[in-house]
């Protein structure tokens, strides 16, 4: 049976919604939506929190300990921050094995049970290496494997690089075939990434997603909607008009934006910067200017509250969508984890209501 036949037959249900017991706080935005202590706990949406390779475990641990988060996503990156007392290997050590296979006891005790391990095609030099990395993620207990194309290893340093012959679609096909052969556990969900803020402005907004679904994707994790919201909505409307959301679990990405500079960084990451004139880049420019204006006109305390509210509203919008299956929160920096921690109670209350 092909990947396309499997997904169209709805054979599998990749993301069961487990019950959780969120801690409900005193966030003013949700003052009228609190769960009373006797309220029966409903099924909750998946709320994934990213385990950053660039932020100390000390800064991330309190946020992961919050019951609002019932899934963790591990990026596939070659270097993890090294400092005394945290579980990451030191810079320069072998980080080729999946992050999920190198968890310290403090992580095992706190991280959610649903682990998503990312595998980047850019780090695969051959088919054999791709299969090895996929199998290692499955053997280590990943609930889902997230296939991404990724950047060439030296791209972050500005070096001229040669892109790997592999991309996320090829990884998906390989992982699907491996699961059919029993080399990947049958319960492992195959996942991919979508970039709606860019794809939504394309002539055929769903072309890339259809290709990934045909390759075996069962879960789709999007880049943040906050960068170009209208274009993101256009992509989502196109996905629903073709009923593609019924063939996979869509998880919306949300990032903590700390300043207008972080907005610009995310826009570059998602391909929304440059001289090209399009609906996406024009809206992205308007978004960046708004953030710059707010940051300039507000004092530090007011701006912190404003950006916390942006995160809260973005999560609320994602979890309120009946066709979505969850949200992926990307704090990225230590400041971001602190911000997510401030609104974690509100996120937990929202997730408990999501159906």
Image (spheres, rainbow, N blue to C red):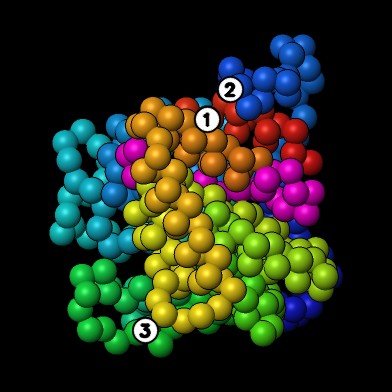
What is the residue that sits farthest to the top in this orientation?
37
Above or below, 126 relative to 262: below
Magenta residue check for 24: no
Residue located 58% across and 17% down the image: 26
Residue located 61% across and 59% down the image: 229
| Residue 43 placement (x, y as % from top left) | 75, 34
At mark 2, the secondary structure is loop
Provide the residue designation for mark 3.
164
Looking at the image, do the residues carrying marks 3 and 1 touch, with CB atoms under 8 Å apart? no
At mark 1, the secondary structure is loop
Q: Quadrant of the N terminus?
A: bottom right
Front residue (pair 63, 290): 290
Q: Which image quadrant is residue 263 in?
A: bottom left
**Whether residue 2 is visible:** yes
Mark sitting earlier along the chain (3/2): 2
Provide the residue designation for mark 2.
27
Looking at the image, do the residues carrying marks 1 and 2 touch, with CB atoms under 8 Å apart? yes
């Amino acid at each position: 049976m092909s990947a396309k036949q499997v997904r169209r037959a709805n054979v599998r249900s990749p993301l069961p919604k487990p019950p959780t017991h969120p801690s409900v706080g005193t966030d003013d935005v949700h003052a009228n939506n609190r769960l009373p202590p006797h309220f029966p706990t409903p099924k909750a949406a998946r709320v994934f929190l990213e385990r950053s390779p660039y932020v100390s475990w000390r800064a991330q641990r309190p946020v992961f300990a919050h019951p609002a988060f019932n899934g963790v996503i591990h990026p596939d990156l070659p270097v993890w921050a090294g400092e005394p007392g945290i579980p990451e290997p030191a810079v320069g050590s072998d980080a080729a094995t999946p992050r999920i296979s190198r968890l310290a006891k403090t992580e095992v005790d706190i991280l959610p049970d649903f682990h998503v391990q990312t595998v980047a095609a850019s780090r695969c030099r051959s088919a054999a290496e791709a299969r090895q990395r996929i199998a290692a993620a499955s053997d280590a207990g990943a609930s889902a494997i997230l296939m991404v194309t990724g950047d060439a290893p030296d791209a972050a340093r500005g070096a001229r690089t040669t892109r790997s012959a592999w991309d996320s679609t090829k990884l998906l096909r390989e992982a699907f075939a491996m699961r059919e052969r029993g080399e990947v556990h049958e319960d492992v969900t195959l996942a991919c990434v979508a970039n709606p803020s860019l794809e939504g402005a394309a002539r055929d907004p769903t072309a890339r997603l259809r290709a990934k679904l045909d390759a075996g994707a069962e879960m789709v994790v999007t880049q943040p909607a906050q960068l170009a919201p209208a274009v993101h909505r256009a992509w989502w409307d196109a996905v629903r008009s073709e009923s593609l959301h019924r063939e996979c679990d869509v998880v919306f990405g949300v990032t903590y934006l700390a300043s207008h500079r972080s907005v610009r960084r995310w826009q570059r990451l998602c391909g929304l910067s440059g001289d090209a004139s399009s609906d996406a880049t024009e809206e992205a420019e308007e978004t960046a200017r708004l953030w710059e204006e707010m940051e300039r006109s507000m004092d530090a305390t007011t701006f912190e509250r404003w950006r916390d509210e942006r995160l809260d509203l973005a999560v609320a919008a994602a979890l309120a969508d009946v066709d979505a299956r969850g949200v992926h929160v990307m704090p990225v920096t230590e400041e971001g984890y602190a911000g997510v921690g401030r609104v974690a109670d509100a996120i937990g209350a929202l997730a408990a209501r999501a159906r």
